[in-house]
Amino acid sequence: MSGHPREPVPVVLAGARGHGRWHLDNLRRLTGAGRVTLAGVCELKPLEESELGGFGPVAQSDDFGALLDATGARIAIVCTPIPTHADLALTAARRGVHLLLEKPPAPSYAEYARMARGVAEQGIACQVGFQSLGSHAVPHVRDLVRDGVIGEPLGIGAAGAWARDEAYFRRAPWAGRRRLDDGAGGHVDVVDGVLTNPLAHAVATALALDGATGADDLADIRTELFRAHTIEADDTSYVGITTRRDTRVTVAATLCAERPGEPYVVVPGTHGRITFWYKQDRVLVQRAGHGPQETAHGRTDLLENLVDHLTAGAELLVTPASTGAFMRVVEAIRRAPDPRALPADAWRTAPGAGEDTVRRVVPGIDALVAASADSLTGYAELGAVWARTGLEAAP
């Protein structure tokens, strides 16, 4: 393919377990295509040979900076715990190494701003890992709305009903936490809630459909944060956003679903609605006087886009600046009062995905999440008994 380099681009992966395994698989694919080579892996515990199948010899170290220096990597993928994102991004930037930085890019707006400023000062390319924003369905939905296919849009609602068992929140010391002791009498932010990590794509995708992606594009943010699990962070939450364009954007999400399903974003209009299942790149248009029309779309891989940016001048799809609005939402959640624990009669236990695992289920939550997206309202306004204390305005 024209524009591809003669030599593959060397990449270092920081964080190769957990979600990092997805990156390893993607690196295998792009290695086979001659686009990249895995030059190094940064992990506290080195990967076994079986985990590196298909790559050949790979340098390994728990010292990220030293590994970048030793390998001559041109790109670093940072897929490490949330509190480490900004520091590792800046470690790479100071060495002139370009970045694919996993979402959320930072646990607070201040850390995000520090990271973005440092990256810009070093002149390196940084792609933030919102894979859904590489979907070709995103511009397609925007075009449908612009062309008046559903009449006047009434807002944008997102819904995510997932399930995670209790072991999910024990997978790492930072899992399900809002903050951690820094060992020096203070704390570091984590903000590992349902809207900021596992279903962060729902927030980012909904904002992107409106074009409200910059840090100054939001006028108001209100949250409803709850938890059924014994954690610090939220596992069943809602955020209601008003953009500078006066668009109503809402996201309702849970990790306590009765029947987990595909998350989606819906754009209701005066003459129809558009539903976008963003993990599947699938769009359904329903409107008066027409049969339902469903289309499937391609997706540009964000690492491949970063390689194309470096080698052929392609425009980056998800820059730090284009995640500013998302980080305003993260900051509103970080500064909100701690999530309220649901009363014992608002949830029940059910078998988890693995053997001898248990998860918590909030009866009726699937319907509430869907109703929120349809009506652009939160749990309290929908009448959930456990949410009747109302909304929290962002400080």
Image (cartoon, rainbow, N blue to C red):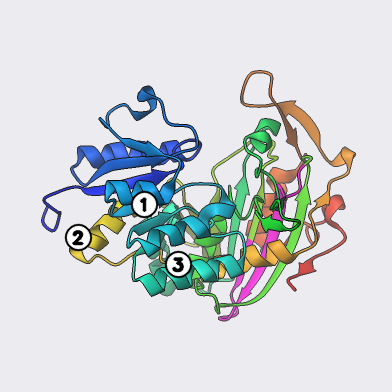
Q: Residue at x 44, y 38 (%)?
A: 16
Quadrant occupied by the C terminus:
bottom right
Residue 76's mark?
1
Instruction: Tell which tag, 1 or 2, sits nearer the viewer.
Output: 1
Using the image, determine if residue 220 lies above or below residue 12.
below
What range is drawn magenta here? 231-250
Against 331, is 244 above or below? below
Identify which amino acid the numbered label 3 is placed on.
Answer: Pro
Tag 1 near tag 2, CB within 8 Å: no
Q: Report x, y in % for residue 254.
A: 67, 46
Question: Helix or strand or loop: what does disc 2 sit on?
Answer: helix
Helix, strand or loop at label 1? It is: strand
Q: 335 or 130, which is in the foreground?
A: 335
Residue 93 is at least partly visible in this image: yes
The part of the image, by quadrant, that contains residue 112 is bottom right
Q: Earlier in the sequence, mark 1 or mark 2?
A: 1
Q: Residue at x 34, y 29 (%)?
A: 52
